[in-house]
Amino acid sequence: MVLEGLGKSLRGVLQKVARSNTVDEALLAEIVRDIQRALLQADVNVQVALELTQRVRRRATEEKPPSGATMRDFLVRIIYEEIRRILGAERTLDVKPRRILLTGLFGQGKTTCAGKLARFYQKKGVRTALVAADVHRPAAIDQLEQLAAKVGCDIYSDRSQPKAEEVVRAALVKFGTSEAIIVDTAGRSGIDAELIEELKRVRQVFQPDEVWLVLDAAMGQTAQRSAKAFHEAVGLTGVIVTKLDGSAKGGGALSAVAASGAPIVFIGTGEHLDELERFDATRFVSRLLGMGDIRTLLERFQDLENQEEAQKAGENLLSGKFTLRDMRTQIESLGQMGSVSKLLSFLPGMGNAKLDDKQMAETQERLKKFRAILDSMTAEELSDGHLIKGDRIQRIARGSGQRPQDVRALLKYWEATRKAAHGITSNRRLRRQLERQLGQGGDPA
């Protein structure tokens, strides 16, 4: 895995949080030290590591978790968000760019990256062509031609032409109908005026949709200086960080590039042509922390932070003022949280109610159908379900793509739930009734 050492250390931090009984000052001090140590070992800038851990401590001390979330889960979220923050802003990427200009210093893996990009877009079904615009290094032309042969894409090169911009001009004439044209430019051992001027001339002729800088992860924190210089000179739209696999300085390179203001668009994770992947910071951090897809956790917090309406609906349920609008709010909340069995937890003492797998599947399907029906109702009908009769039922059924009997089943369920909650004599009785209505295959009665 990319940055395995950093990931292992950070996963240790999360395990320490999970094993703790409480989140107190002693635990915060310990995890702050552990995070700082992990980041510094991955070559992340000292100031960046310090500021990150300061924000973790401050937020864990000053912010309160939303109702329904534990402080331990909240602390995990904070750690995720702050690590995600140092990787910079994400950007959407057109699947079919017309023209891509690759830039970079000598030895950064630029030519190999051109081949990987060609493979990436070819696999997406995009017709792709390569252009060998490194007129200073014949070996670069040979290498690109070999890569084009492996990928199975077109290539344009002209060893007799000493001007890179003229090579690009001729390539545009040849590949005018190609959906993606990738230009490999010359590198230098350092950023100099001659390199920048040549890039500017190529850019003027090529008129690229994307200008991407290729950087070796082994550069570590010095990657920021290169990214910033190229960004100021030719206006980067993104950065590709190569050779990230096994690089002890990978963390430094990623955070440094983000600090330059140029978003990371791809990362190279190996030598093979297929080892190039889109950079998705959320998923990258999720994998780093060993948490699978952390989006689920984040969505849960988002749901909990917007529970005022759901709580009000729960209060209305107990008071007998439960409307169809309240019912829609509850169903929407449950659907987002991904746990239908939590329906019973909206009522006191019902948190241990369980549904088996078959009942869960049937209930989820039923709630999905109910949501479609509720979305087809007017504001007036959502406020007063007793208005829904005859023609209104037919209209709602047509609008939701359901049957009239499905609409009637929803109204029966709503009325039964409202009456049962209002006239409840025991939690046990309500639990049996709700389990029968939601957990069984028949229409609610």
Image (tube, grey):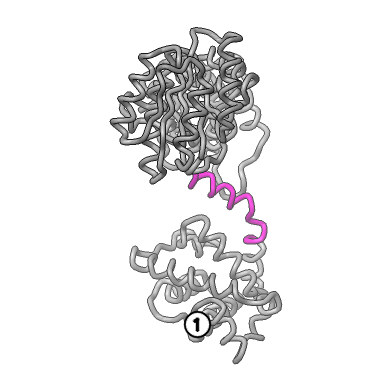
Q: Which of the 4 image quarters holds residue 365?
A: bottom left
- Residue 336 lies, in percent from the top left, at 52, 57
Circle 1: element type: helix
Horizontal side of 157 relative to 414 (left or right) equals left
**Residue at 52% over, 42% down:** 94
424 inside magenta stretch: no
Judged from this view, the residue extending furthest toward the front is 160
Number of numbered markers = 1
**Residue at 67% over, 57% down:** 308
Horizontal side of 428 relative to 234 (left or right) equals left
Q: Which of the 4 image quarters holds residue 270?
A: top left
- Residue 246 lies, in percent from the top left, at 36, 19
In this view of the protein, can residue 40 be seen by the observer?
no
- Residue 401 lies, in percent from the top left, at 50, 77
**Residue at 68% over, 33% down:** 62
- Residue 102 lies, in percent from the top left, at 49, 25
Q: Which residue position holds label 1?
A: 409
Q: In the depicted view, which residue is nearer to us: 326 or 388?
A: 388
In this view of the protein, can residue 353 be seen by the observer?
yes
Rendered position, 317 above or below 265 = below
Q: In the depicted view, which residue is nearer to us: 374 or 324?
A: 374
309 inside magenta stretch: yes
Range of the magenta residues? 294-311
How crowded pointer 1 is (Cα within 10 Å; few <14, some 14-19, many 20+) is rated as some
